[in-house]
Image: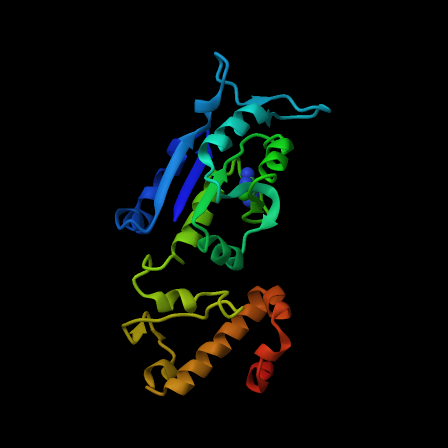
């Protein structure tokens, strides 16, 4: 997969080359290029923003600069992603969708956003998604890009050591994952639940499912409510 990021703070994206993502790049599974938006400015001040039509606080990023940058960076099969708190919520389903693309281009806005005509123009020739990573406001889209790229990259074939772990994630069955334990058997007087040491795989599976249901019920009742009714069996409903 090819990922391009356009930003006025290229150094903010340095973590994309560390740890799991760095390994994926080294192994040729992922190709990431970060571009400085100011390379496409056209005045001595290298201005990327201007005051908003209609008045109000803050600045809006200029359409001419973004237009030239995206013309230069976007391949013909690009899927353009614009991080913004005003976007559709980023989900695991969206991560899977993005992971199936050949080319993703992220356009990081700062200030009060990008002139909306940049999105309207891009939509004339490519798929564009305005996406939010949650109901809070960040200073710019860079951290949202780090979040989304990590969520997407770990789904690419060969990136994770053990592909089963992607399938057992929270959200893959619509539930939060339950608790995990390792040695020792007792730590600070806290024992590991007996069933996990029983060797009874059916009992372990049932216990894990119950803890996942219980945790989801307490922390994310919205997820339980969204489950298709036929995904809960009789025992599930009793928990
Ligand atoms: Cl994608 N960008 C910014 N600036 N703030 C956010 C966000 C994105 N998602 C949540 N808050």
Q: In this view of the protein, which residue sits in the foreground, 132 or 71?
A: 71
Q: Could you tell me which residue is drawn at 48 percent across and 77 percent down?
A: 209
Q: In this view of the protein, which residue sits in the foreground, 181 or 29?
A: 29
Scheme of image coloration? rainbow
The x and y percentages for residue 211 are 48, 75
**Which quadrant holds residue 226?**
bottom right
Q: Could you tell me which residue is drawn at 53 percent across and 34 percent down?
A: 109
Farthest-out residue, top: 44
The x and y percentages for residue 28 are 29, 49
> Relative to residue 185, is residue 224 drawn left or right?
right
Q: Could you tell me which residue is drawn at 54 percent across and 31 percent down?
A: 110
> Relative to residue 210, is residue 192 drawn left or right?
left
Q: How many marks?
A: 0
Whether residue 140 is visible: yes
The x and y percentages for residue 196 are 36, 80
Q: In this view of the protein, which residue sits in the foreground, 204 or 230?
A: 230
Is the residue 17 above or below the residue 185 in the image? above
Q: Could you tell me which residue is drawn at 38 percent across and 57 percent down?
A: 156
Tell me which image quadrant ligand 1 sits in: top right
Whether residue 62 is visible: no
Is the residue 210 above or below the residue 9 in the image? below
The x and y percentages for residue 167 are 42, 68
- The C terminus - image quarter: bottom right
Farthest-out residue, right: 54
């Amino acid at each position: 997969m090819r990922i391009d990021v356009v930003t006025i703070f290229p150094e903010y994206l340095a973590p994309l080359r560390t740890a799991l993502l760095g390994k994926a790049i080294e192994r040729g599974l992922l190709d990431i290029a970060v571009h400085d938006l100011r390379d496409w400015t056209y005045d001595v001040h290298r201005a990327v923003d201007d005051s908003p039509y209609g008045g109000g606080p803050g600045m809006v990023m200029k359409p001419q600069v973004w237009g030239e940058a995206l013309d230069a960076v976007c391949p013909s099969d690009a899927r353009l992603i614009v991080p913004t708190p005003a976007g559709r919520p980023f989900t695991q389903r969206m991560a899977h969708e993005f992971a199936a693309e050949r080319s993703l281009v992220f356009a990081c806005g700062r200030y009060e956003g990008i002139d909306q005509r940049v999105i309207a123009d891009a939509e004339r020739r490519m798929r564009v998604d305005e996406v939010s990573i949650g109901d809070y406001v960040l200073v710019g889209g860079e951290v949202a890009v780090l979040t989304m790229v990590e969520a997407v990259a770990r789904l690419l074939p060969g990136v994770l050591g053990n592909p089963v772990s992607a399938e057992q994630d929270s959200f893959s069955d619509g539930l939060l994952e339950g608790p995990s334990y390792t040695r020792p058997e007792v730590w600070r007087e806290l024992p590991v639940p007996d069933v996990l040491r029983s060797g009874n795989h059916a009992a372990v599976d049932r216990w894990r499912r119950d803890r996942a249901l219980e945790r989801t019920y307490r922390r994310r009742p919205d997820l339980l409510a969204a489950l298709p009714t036929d995904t809960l069996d009789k025992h599930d409903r009793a928990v």
